[in-house]
Amino acid sequence: MAKTSLKIKLFSVFFYARLILVTILFCATAGICFVILLPFNNAGGRQRIWRTAIKYYGKTVLALSGYPFIKIIYNNLAPEEKEPGVVVMNHRSGSDGFLVAYFTGGVVQVVNDWPFKLPFLGFFARQGEYFNIRAMNWDEFLAAGSKCICDEKFSLVGFPEGTRSGSREMGQFHGALFRLALEIKKPLYPVIIMGNEKIPDLNFVVHPGTIRIYKLPAVQPEQFAGWTPFKFKNYVRELMQSKMAELEK
């Protein structure tokens, strides 16, 4: 196993120190704004405020924490497609949850239970009513996902691999998100993330680099009508792998 250089160790310390500072400032600012706006919003309005705040936090925290050594480039390959739907992203690194914020429009994440246990961020996830997939059965997930996309007009974002790979390899996909898109007949947006497998790596050591995000054209309901979740998830996985191979050349 290669030893981590002193420069990389120092950069990691620098990164996490700024990450903590940005998070504290964000929480303080969001808290003040929330208190000011509290009398003017019902429960649905407050939920939207929390979700918007989380998105802006995610979109800025990596850029501010890693500047100027971490660069993030977002490429929307189908900017005309704006209908809320199901979004699936590959999962290389612990930074992926922050990168969700680059997706156009309102988003709600599907996560395992551990983010809810984090200080600060867990509180925001609960207030934004993010989805704890481990605490929901299929009927609950279908009802909540349908409400989120069809009624609240937020896209539901998840990582079908279930865990980060820490490399350029893509794991097998779980089928829940694809089954949801089939049931509610909404578009599914594949999003690929490249270059962040070491931002941070599996040991949470942060390396400088460039992260590239590509939102691919949606797979529309008329295309996947009649498919099984198994066929659907394998089709999308192959599509994402093929595009990654093309871009990495």
Image (spheres, rainbow, N blue to C red):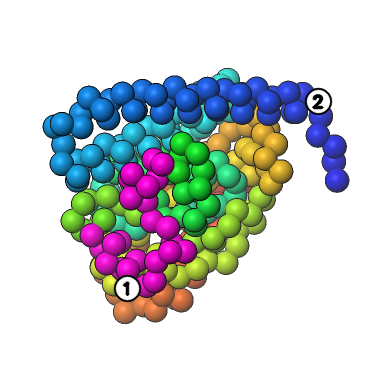
Q: Nearer the viewer, residue 100 or 41?
A: 41
Q: Secondary structure at mark 2?
A: helix
Q: Secondary structure at mark 1?
A: helix
Q: Which residue is mark 2?
A: 6
Q: Position of residue 31 (x, y in %)?
A: 34, 28
The residue stretch that appears in magenta: 123-147
Q: Position of residue 72 (x, y in %)?
A: 51, 32
Q: Number of labelled discs?
A: 2
Q: Position of residue 125 (x, y in %)?
A: 40, 45
Q: Indicate which disc residue 161 carries.
A: none
Name the amino acid type tagged 1.
Asp
Tell which circle, 2 or 1, labels the residue nearer the N-terminal end.
2
Rendered view: 33 above or below 81: above
Q: Which residue is mark 1?
A: 139
Can residue 164 be spotted in the picture? yes
Work out how far the residue at label 2 is from the one at label 1, CA to CA, in angstroms: 50 Å
Residue drawn at x 70%, y 36% is: 205
* Residue 124 falls within the magenta-colored stretch: yes
Residue drawn at x 67%, y 40% is: 204
Label 1 Cα neighbours within 10 Å, binned few <14 / some 14-19 / many ≥20? few
